[in-house]
Image (cartoon, rainbow, N blue to C red):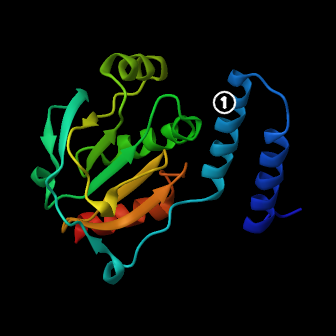
Amino acid sequence: MKFNRSTISNILFFGFIIFLFTPFGLGTRAKLTQGVAYVRTLVFSPSVEKSEERISLDTYNVNLKGLVSANDINLKDLKGKVVFINFWATWCPPCIAEMPMIKSLYTDYNGKIEFLFVTNEDQKKVKQFYTKNNYNFPTYNLISKLPKQIDYTTLPTTYILDKNGKVALFETGAANWNSDKVKQLLNDLISE
């Protein structure tokens, strides 16, 4: 039996409904949520904006405090570079589910593009999470207001900015960041 996107979406939807009404403990529920998010990342890759439809940021003046593998930075210092911004938290199952794919992307593109992992958690909690999972992403706390074009209300939320400061990709929820589609976008943005 061949599964198409619609069939897989329906399976995930009904699985989620069953999940909602099944009496699990908090830890089990979190693991199941993480599992559903991981399956979603295998099925859905982020959608890419056409270059003529990209929106510009109102301001690039965004201050970030370095937590792990990072010094304090202002987003305006990265103008002219491709920037991958991921808003996440250690307690967020979909964030945890997409981290292995982000790690692979980071391994392939670190040094070619700028990676910013932004959380509102403290340094100790992030370091413990990274140590446990063998991650070492440049991680920051936001210390100024975001422009409305990259403000977020859901975790995880990810943006990829082109060299001109325009949003080339925006995705909420877990996604497959190591997909051919994302890599092609990054290669195109790097060569622009």
Q: Quadrant of residue 6?
A: bottom right
Question: Residue 23's x, y, as percent?
Answer: 84, 29
Q: Looking at this view, name the residue that lies furthest to the right.
A: 1
Report the residue at 51% width, 39% height from top. 95
Which quadrant of the rendered structure holds the C terminus?
bottom left
Q: Residues within 10 Å of mark 1 (few under 14, many from 20)?
A: some
Q: Image quadrant of residue 51?
A: bottom left
**Which element type, helix, strand or loop, lies under badge 1?**
helix
Look at 13% across and 54% down and name the residue there.
Answer: 61
Please give the count of numbered marks on the rendered protein.
1
Q: Which quadrant would residue 149 be assigned to in this image?
A: bottom left
Location of mark 1 (residue): 30
Q: Please indicate, yes or no, whether residue 91 appears anywhere in the rendered image.
A: yes
> Outermost residue, bottom direction?
52
- Quarter of the figure with the N terminus: bottom right
Q: Of the residues shown, which amino acid type is indicated by label 1?
A: Ala
Image vertical order of residue 182 relative to residue 97, above or below: below
Q: Is residue 69 visible?
A: no
Q: Is residue 81 left or right of residue 174?
A: left
Q: Is residue 74 left or right of residue 156?
A: left
Question: Whole-percent x and y of residue 161?
Answer: 28, 61
Q: Is residue 33 above or below residue 180?
A: above
Measuring from the top left, give residue 119's x and y in whole percent: 36, 35
Q: Position of residue 116 (x, y in %)?
A: 29, 43
Q: Vertically, is 181 above or below 29?
A: below
